[in-house]
Structures are given as structure tokens and as C-alpha cells.
Amino acid sequence: QVHLQESGPGLVKPSETLSLTCTVSGGSISAYWWSWIRQPAGKGLQWIGHIDNSGSANYNTSLKSRVTMSADTSKNQLSLKVISATAADTAIYYCATSSYTGFDFWGQGILVTVSS
Amino acid sequence: EIVLTQSPGTLSLSPGERATLSCRASQSVSSSFLAWYQQRPGQPPRLLIYAASNRAKGIPDRFSGSGSGTDFTLTISRLEPEDFAVYYCQQYDNSLPMYTFGQGTKLEIK
């Protein structure tokens, strides 16, 4: 069974870039599609974007101008960057396997706070 | 963009009772692309149902999904203490492509 672990800074200053990594074990990242999903405290889930196994990415239209996702097959890692971070980007960030039928495996999530 | 609206916002029931959760889409959704998740406090969501009515691996058979078009339902036949959690529906729109979630239904102990 694939295991996912998010990592990165827990605190980001406003206007700076939020950068996270998802390390995958128990399976090759080339075998799956991958999504990033976030959840502000006490609120619902928002899909950020996904990257397929050819490296092609699609993003939520509401975030598209600020988000970049990539995959490093040599390290079996995924990355997420959100530029020009604001307090509205404060959330728990999850990586997950994705397909047409949904999100099967999830990481435990990482809390990122955007604050000076 | 397809909007999913879940009802009720909060459902108060007792263990052993039957729970019926609703998910309504702003336009027709392919049943193949409709899923349900359970999220317990401090945990990531867990896939329960995919393609509207198929239980994910390891999900007890007291969980069932149904529906088509714009109206979908998650039913828990007899509530166990561990079932009290927040439930989300989610759809995939392959024309954009994009995933969206409903706002969630909190199932609480009465």
C-alpha cells in the first residue's frame, strides 16, 4: 500500500512562496495521478490541482495563476508551490492519489500558517 | 463549475439508527465520478464510496451509496460509535478537468 508524507515549512510570511513536498513510499509516483488538497481549520476540502503520470498538471481555476505542481521521479517526490501567499492560504495541506473515481490514499497532512 | 450541496449540515442520531446523507449537484454528474469520504477529527479523509455506489476496499457493508444525475445519497444502515464524523461528497468534471467537494455533513451523536 502506498504511503504519503507531506513536509515543508509550517510558517510562511505573507507575499512569500509556500513550498511543500510529498514523499511517496510503497509505490512509484509514475504509477499514479497525484493531487494536492487543502482544508482551512474547521472548514471543508478544496482541491488544488493534480499531476498525471506523464507529468501534465491541471489546477483549480480559482488558484491556477498562483500554483505549480511537479514530480521528481528520481526521488519519488511531488512538490507544490503557491506564490504570493496570503492568510487565506492558511490550511492543512494533503497530498493524495487521484483518479476519475476519487482520492484513494492520503497523507496525514501538514499545517501551513501564513503570518508575519 | 459544478457545485455540490450537502444536506443536512448537521445530523444528530443515536448509535444503531439509520443515517441518510444527501448530495445535490448543480448540474448532472456522471455516476462514475461521484465519491463519498469520511473524516474523523485530526485525520485525513477516507474514501468510502466511489462511482456513486461502490464500496472502497475495507469499508463495512453498512455503508452504501446510491443516486444518479444530480441527486446522490450515502446511507449508513446501523450507526456504530466510530461512524460519527464529517462526510463529504466529491465529483470529477472531466471537461475542465476539475474536482469539487460538497461542504460536508457533520454526523453527531444525539
Image (tube, coloured by chain):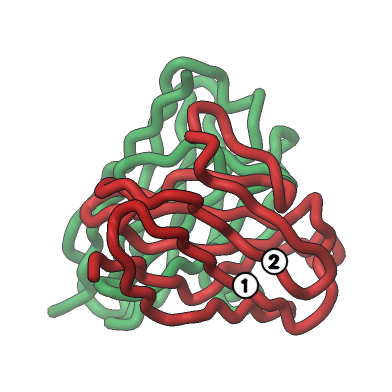
Q: Position of residue B36 (x, y in %)?
A: 57, 55
Q: B54 or A35: which is nearer to us?
A: B54
Chain rendered red: B
What residue sits 32% from the left and 73% below the top? B12
Label 2, label 1: how far apart the Cα atoms are: 5 Å
Q: What's the chain of the residue with tag 1?
A: B
B71 sits left or right of B48 in the view? right
Q: Nearer the viewer, residue B64 or B95?
A: B64
The answer to which quarter of the image holds residue A92 is bottom left
Q: Earlier in the sequence, mark 2 or mark 1?
A: 1
Q: Which residue is mark 2?
A: B72
Image position, residue B13 (x, y; %): 33, 68
Q: Amino acid at mark 2?
A: Phe
Q: Secondary structure at mark 2?
A: strand
So how many labels did they put on this image? 2
**Residue at (23% x, 58% y) in the render:** A111
- In what quadrant of the picture does the C terminus of chain A appear? bottom left
Q: Residues within 10 Å of mark 1 (few under 14, many from 20)?
A: many
Identify the colour of chain A in the image. green
Task: Report the amino acid beneath label 1.
Answer: Cys
Seen at 62% across and 43% down, the residue is A98
Residue A70 visible (yes or no): no
